Image (spheres, helix red, strand yellow):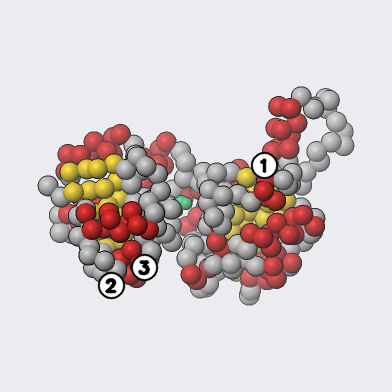
Amino acid sequence: MKTLLITRPIADAVLDQARAKFDVTVNEGGTLTEAECVAALASYDCILPTLGDAFTAASFAGDIRCKMLGNFGVGYNHIDDAAAAAAGVIVSNTPDVLTDATADIALTLLLATARRAGEGERMVRSGAWGGFDVKGLLGTHVTGKTLGVIGMGRIGQAIAARCHYGFGMDVVFHNRSPKVTEVPARQLESLQAVMETADFVVVATPGGAGTTKLIDAAALAEMKPTGIFINISRGEVVDETALIDVLEKGAITGAGLDVYENEPHVPERLIALENCVLLPHLGSATQETRQAMGQMALDNIIAWSEGKTPPQQVN
Ligand code: GLV
């Protein structure tokens, strides 16, 4: 039997299937450091890793027994997939199954930030609410506004559909390559054009070298003072300090974030801001979605173990 390391406990139903086919070890110790990735690559035939595990280029430099990383997650910016390929290690991911859940979290953040739900929740729980207030906690109207999507992939399009069909929003977007979308939406000529046109900017790009700090101080400076900024992709896509600067200055109205530059660290300056809704990377966090992600990650590993091409191979 091939040995399989699963780097976090996953749904029991998927774990049972894995145990029937592999000699399974489940890591209960949390995120793998680079040194732990080196040790894992040297010790196991295949690995089911997830976000945060540090499969850096350097981790593939030593003696490697592992031939397959079936990543749990669509984003795999924690794995140097080129270094993996050079070392003969296949990498796969879990697209599609988390599109709806992640788009739903974008809408959760968009609505919660626009309607100041975090502030309201804190007010009720602290006992500070004095009753219906005609001028209290007035937020930003959502219906009929303009949505700007940065990164019009599967998740970006699912967000656009929710906003267009659900809230009558006009959709503009920025995408590296030209994109024809099913949902009515206009691709603008530049990132700047989207930043300045949209009432709500939602970042839905992949992470990785190509998008690091794509949203920098200059891009944020294009936003309307009434604008609301949402990020459900990867923290590294946004210059977090520049974002905090514009929020502190009141140069934009608010932000809703599911991801951070150095997770799980969230800067104190961000936590201090009332006009931010902050979630702990919940994009794909539904029972159904996490089970489907585990199943897809395992199915890729099984395909590899049977000598087939893993259906979601990325390198
Ligand atoms: C979650 O962020 C994922 O990439 O699957």
Q: Whole-percent x and y of residue 235?
A: 56, 57
302 sits left or right of 209 in the view: left
Q: Nearer the viewer, mark 2 or mark 1?
A: 2
Q: Are marks 1 and 3 in contact (CB under 8 Å)?
A: no
- For this orientation, the residue located farthest to the bottom is 189
C-alpha gap between disc 1 and disc 3: 39 Å
Residue nearer the viewer, 231 or 168:
231
- Name the kind of residue labelled 3 in the image: Ala
Q: Whole-percent x and y of residue 196?
A: 73, 66
C-alpha gap between disc 2 and disc 1: 44 Å
- Which numbered disc flags the more N-terminal residue, 2 or 3? 3
- Name the kind of residue labelled 1 in the image: Ala
Residue 59 image-quadrant placement: bottom left
Disc 2 target residue: 86
The crowding category of the residue bearing disc 2, from other C-alpha atoms within 10 Å (few below 14, some 14 to 19, many at least 20), is: few
- Name the kind of residue labelled 2 in the image: Ala
Disc 3 target residue: 57
The crowding category of the residue bearing disc 1, from other C-alpha atoms within 10 Å (few below 14, some 14 to 19, many at least 20), is: many
Q: Residue at x 84, y 36 (%)?
A: 136
Q: Residue at x 32, y 43 (%)?
A: 27
Disc 1 target residue: 112
Is there any visible trace of residue 232 in the rendered image?
no
Residue nearer the viewer, 19 or 192:
19
